[in-house]
Image (spheres, grey):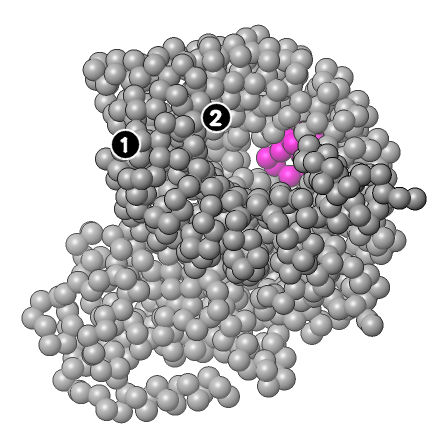
Amino acid sequence: MESSEKLTSDSEGSNGLNLKATELRLGLPGSESPERIDSVGGLDKNGYPLGVLKNLVSGAKRGFSDAIDGGSGKWVFSGSGGSETDLAKGGGLFSPRGGNGGGKHLGGSESNNQHSSLGTPAKNDVVPQSPKPMHEKKPQISAPAAKAQVVGWPPIRSFRKNSMASNLPKNDEDAEGKLGSGCLYVKVSMDGAPYLRKVDLKLYCTYLELSSALEKMFSCFTIGQCGSNGVPIRDGLSESRLMDLLHGSEYVLTYEDKDGDWMLVGDVPWEMFTDSCKRMRIMKSSEAIGLAPRAMEKCKSRN
Amino acid sequence: MAYSFPEEVLEHVFSFIHTDKDRNAISVVCKSWYEVERWSRRRIFIGNCYAVSPGIVIRRFPELRSVALKGKPHFADFNLVPEGWGGNVYPWIAAMAMAYPMLEELRLKRMVVTDESLELISRSFKNFKVLVLSSCEGFSTDGLAAIAANCRNLRELDLRESEVDDFSGHWLTHFPDSCTSLVSLNISCLASEVSFSALERLVGRCPSLRTLRLNRAVPLDRLPNLLRRAPQLVELGTGAYSAEHRPEVFSSLAGAFANCKELKSLSGFWDVVPDYLPAVYPACSGITSLNLSYATIQSPDLIKLVTQCQNLQRLWVLDYIEDGGLDALAASCKDLQELRVFPSEPYDMEGNVALTEQGLVSVSEGCPKLHSVLYFCRQMTNAALVSIAKNRPNMTRFRLCIIEPRTRDYQTLEPLDVGFGAIVEHCKELQRLSLSGLLTDRVFEYIGTHAKKLEMLSVAFAGDGDLGLHHVLSGCESLRKLEIRDCPFGDKALLANAAKLETMRSLWMSSCSVSFGACKLLGQKMPRLNVEVMDEGGRPDSRPESCSVEKLYIYRSVAGPRSDMPRFVWTMKTLS
């Protein structure tokens, strides 16, 4: 109910758009060459009409959902009810090694049995995506599933983990991989949400996994507004509502990279993303100005 | 009976009584002692900020000068507590700004501290001296600038392991030239480069500076200048300890260290290059505390350094030290009291270093004063634990983390119940214990039977059922903090021992088998407990009552349920 109201108001805003301005090209409408937008908040408040921006975003197929699957628009969700392994809740997958009793049921909150999109696709996705298959360095790590970690275990403080994470690799063979650390926490904020979350990027191997986790994490915000009507929060519709919102490009997922630029998530190979992502923001599409062309350009210049 | 002493005399006597325990004891002797004590108390420690409210504290203790507060549960250190949970210090600061204009010291741990709070502190307390923010978050270097600029008599600024939004190192320049009172400065958690010239000037004009912990961004070639300005330093944390090998840098550094004749504690050593380590050798004989836990150097270099420190009492190190290094440590450092060995590659399936249970056994044999241990390793045996227990009956803190959950004794393939049982049986003064490895309910029976002085217990992936929890709750008389994750403990033990929970500071249980119904019952029956259920998946009452809750945090409180809970925390209300 409320989300459809939102969509309506946004589409009303787009009625006054300037057709010429929606022409897709590198750089912002009205400029000859691509401009860099300062990264503070990632927003350029130079007064570009909202309608332009919205169409720029959707016209460029930069909605998060589209970016995820290489633009095919496919969206596989793990959020279809049940008490499954829920990365967003901070419940990581159990390392399915022997002696661990993989699949052991723990208090009902986590279960190894329902991998859904988290298990198999991950294995398929990592190898082609990763330009530097670090897993091949160490013979005992044969599959990404072995990299799955339990949240908060071993019990090491974030400060220590992050310090070790930025240690320079000692050996040549590790020079291309990430040495030692198994953890990379970045903050994720969402426009309109009262507080932010942290995710461990190393828990995921693909954008798909990340997006599922974020959906779960933030669904309680978007449906929080519906909850006050007495609609039960936990129902199949609610989680898919966020999916719809993202799918319909109400929100886009962006990240701040090492250079301080705000980019759209999904443009670069996963490894490159985790290497450079400092923090993420789920922002309203209407505010994601000019990120598309800049991201494409940056990607080109990197490669 | 007439009172024997006028109040002034009582007050004078009480001024010699400092510990919280003693102060609390004298306050319950009689009403007049209570009154004198409360007016004369200057220092307070609040282990759980939600156990009491600012108003209650202020009403009882009108003249505090030093306040220590702890916020989030310990497992927040390991990301088990979601963002937004709480622990915001602002309400405390706001209340204290009105009530304690003469407040001098604030020590906060695991609290959310905003820039607003820091600014308020800097403006409200004219004689503010000590700010310690341990594992805090929520503030930026802007807030630090306010502290630097406005706290004229600042003695200590210690940001240990806090998470700071680091915009730039410029904040340090906000210390006015007139600031000469610094005794302790710890900025090791900051990422940005601070202005070196400002830092040098600051260090140079504070003759009482005894603790200086730099951040990683301070390059090694800047260190000699800093040290020369502060030869009186007692505790030093270096920045990155690496540089190209240049003899003049080395000799400058060695000379500077030799000049610091009071040095007792060294830390930092990020990115350490072994070639430069000998520069600290002149200082080693005086060193009692050495934190090499960020130093990624190998065992031979570690041994060379550590064996120079004959007076070492505390060593924090990575597992690169290996069993061989620990043997050397045991042979050289007979005064060793505390050992912490951290994992260099905690997420690797198999270890890459030759550190086993043997290293710990060696140290327990060779170091008679060893009483505090934190040890990450990949294998263990009951026999080793029994040896350690028998060698060191003086053990007070024993935290063992076998990296893979539910690991058996690798020799006998048995659970490690007997080993930990020996620890609690022999180490009668044990105050803190963390378990790991494969453990059945038996270990909890041992703990309940023997661990009578145990105050804090951490349990993960252990036990068979409710009986385990019951043993602990019914047997451990001194228990204050219990934190449990991923154990099959359920309702029965919890409900049967509900009264015990009021004698403890807090209980944390996550990924266990406690049902929502039991939580509700507990909340209803125990008015002086706050029973908080955390569930990011949605309202727990939208599921059957028999469903397990994700996370449970129970703590005693005289302040009633808190009012700042985020959406994913529900408090189980008391029925009136």
Q: Tell me the number on the disc at residue B117.
A: none
For label 1, the residue is B200
Observer-nearest of B478 and B546: B478
- The residue located at (47%, 45%) in the rendering is B128
Amino acid type, residue under disc 1 in the picture: Glu
> Dividing the image into 4 quarters, which one contains the N terminus of chain B?
top right
Q: For marks 2 and 1, give the one nearer the viewer.
A: 1
Is there any visible trace of residue A39 in the rendered image? Answer: yes
Disc 2 chain ID: B
Disc 1 chain ID: B
Please say if the residues under marks 2 and 1 sit with CB atoms less than 8 Å apart.
Answer: no
Amino acid type, residue under disc 2 in the picture: Asn
Observer-nearest of B447 and B572: B572
The residues colored magenta run B398-409
Tag 2 secondary structure: strand
For label 2, the residue is B291
Observer-nearest of A35 and B26: B26
Q: Residue furthest top?
A: B331
> Dividing the image into 4 quarters, which one contains the C terminus of chain B?
bottom right
- The residue located at (85%, 53%) in the rendering is B499
* Residue B111 falls left or right of residue B412: left
Query: Residue B415 appears in which quarter of the rendering?
Result: top right
Please say if B545 is above or below B118.
below
Query: Residue B447 appears in which quarter of the rendering?
Result: top right
* Residue A218 falls left or right of residue B200: right
Image location of residue B439, percent across then percent down? 75, 36
